[in-house]
Amino acid sequence: MTASIDRIISRVSRWPGVETAPHRFGGTEFVVAGREIAHVHDAGVVDLALTRRVRDVLLTDGLADPHHVLPDSAWVTYRVRSGADVPDAMRLLRLAYLWRLLAVRRRGIDPDPEADPDTDLRRLGLPADLDALVRETFRDSLDRRAPV
């Protein structure tokens, strides 16, 4: 599993504004604008910090599982069992990244000024309910003409 997790770490750590650090319970965490968005463990566990509303949609749509330690929290877990699971793990990690990016843009912080979240969301091909939730929450930030 380490090769798949190493591939994930390599990709996510190259996204603008992402900092990596050792996670307090082992593995590697990803931080954007001072807040952890996710972490990975060598055993193939990807834990993502989102919001309860996003968590609920991910669980309902079967895209993630409740967090393996804190099942009632806003965190979710995705298990990478083989290299075939890496694209879905990356999709969830990109969603967590975009969620954080859009949230900090509201505060005038932009760790990735070149990012076009609207295009990224379309590329992610999220289920309609999840796409609608993101777009509803960040309507102003998704309009590239809107001031950030």
Image (cartoon, rainbow, N blue to C red):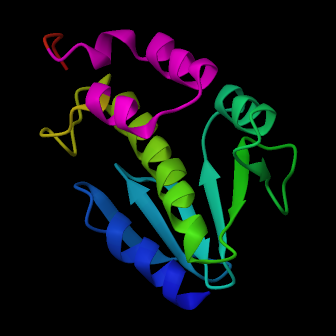
- Left or right: 103 as drawn, with respect to 3: left
**Closer to the camera in the image, 9 or 125:** 125
Within the image, what quadrant is residue 72 found in? top right
Residue 5 percent location from the top left of the image: 52, 79
Magenta segment:
118-144
- Left or right: 138 as drawn, with respect to 119: right
Residue 103 percent location from the top left of the image: 40, 29
Relative to 124, residue 54 above or below: above
- Left or right: 17 as drawn, with respect to 31: left
- Left or right: 56 as drawn, with respect to 13: right
Q: Magenta segment, principal secondary structure?
A: helix
Location of the C terminus (image quadrant)? top left
Residue positioned 41% across, 46% down in the render: 97
Residue 142 percent location from the top left of the image: 30, 18
Residue positioned 27% across, 58% down in the render: 15
Residue 121 percent location from the top left of the image: 38, 31
Relative to 98, residue 108 above or below: above
Residue positioned 24% across, 13% down in the render: 143
**Closer to the camera in the image, 119 or 54:** 119
